[in-house]
Amino acid sequence: MLLRLIVFVVLAVVATRLCKLAYILGYHKAIYNQYPGPCRVVPNVDKGSEDITVTSDGLAFISSGVTSPRYIHNPRHSPQLVKGRIFLFDFNNPDENATEISLVGNFGRDSFYPHGISLYEDPKTGTVYFC
């Protein structure tokens, strides 16, 4: 009787561990392959494109020109050749290329290297704030 109880407890512990292992490995999850469509390289958006943010209308703002100390010895990414820019891409017309936005304001363009961009869309007025 005691032997049966020990065997039952050992089998219960093993079964519990196997169920936990199957859960951790994700055997219960369904995985669906999704293909977003054809991809292509958007010309002129290079030299350290770091961030992209999209409005609800499908307009994407892309920051470009991020520099890093690791690029000091790389002639393609030297700070003299890299120019900080913001591009606009329209996902409603994906065959068109990104266009550079002319930046207005009193700031040092020579030291403009955008790193991270954000948008806020005011739901009441529909105004888009870019920062």
Image (cartoon, rainbow, N blue to C red):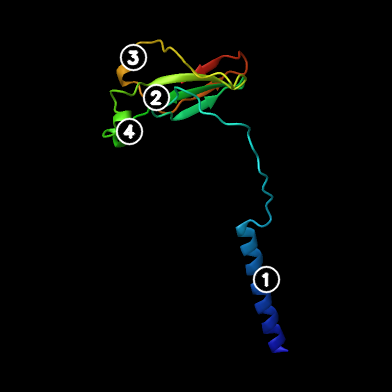
Q: Mark 2 vs mark 1: which is more N-terminal?
A: 1
For the residues labelled 4 and 2, the Cα–Cα distance comes to 12 Å
For the residues labelled 2 and 3, the Cα–Cα distance comes to 13 Å
For the residues labelled 4 and 3, the Cα–Cα distance comes to 21 Å
Q: Looking at the image, which residue is at 30% across and 18% down? A: 110
Mark 2 element type = loop
Where in the figure is residue 62, as x and y percent of width and height?
48, 24
- Quick check: marks 2 and 1 in contact, CB under 8 Å? no
Name the residue that disc number 2 marks. Answer: 114
Looking at the image, is 85 positioned above or below residue 5? above
Seen from the viewer's position, the closer of residues 9 and 79 is 79
Mark 2 closeness class: few <14, some 14–19, many ≥20 residues within 10 Å: many
Name the residue that disc number 4 marks. Answer: 68
Name the residue that disc number 1 marks. Answer: 15
Where in the figure is residue 130, as x and y percent of width and height?
49, 19
Q: Mark 2 vs mark 3: which is more N-terminal?
A: 3
Q: Amino acid at mark 1?
A: Ala
Name the residue that disc number 3 marks. Answer: 107
Asked if residue 76 lies left or right of residue 86, the reply is left
Q: Amino acid at mark 4?
A: Ser
Mark 3 element type = loop
Q: Mark 3 vs mark 1: which is more N-terminal?
A: 1
Q: Looking at the image, which residue is at 41% across and 10% down? A: 104
The mark lying in front, picked from 4 and 3, is 4
**Which labelled disc corresponds to residue 93?**
none
Mark 3 closeness class: few <14, some 14–19, many ≥20 residues within 10 Å: few
Mark 4 element type = loop
Where in the figure is residue 6, as x and y percent of width and height?
67, 83
The mark lying in front, picked from 4 and 2, is 4
Q: Mark 4 vs mark 2: which is more N-terminal?
A: 4
For the residues labelled 1 and 4, the Cα–Cα distance comes to 52 Å
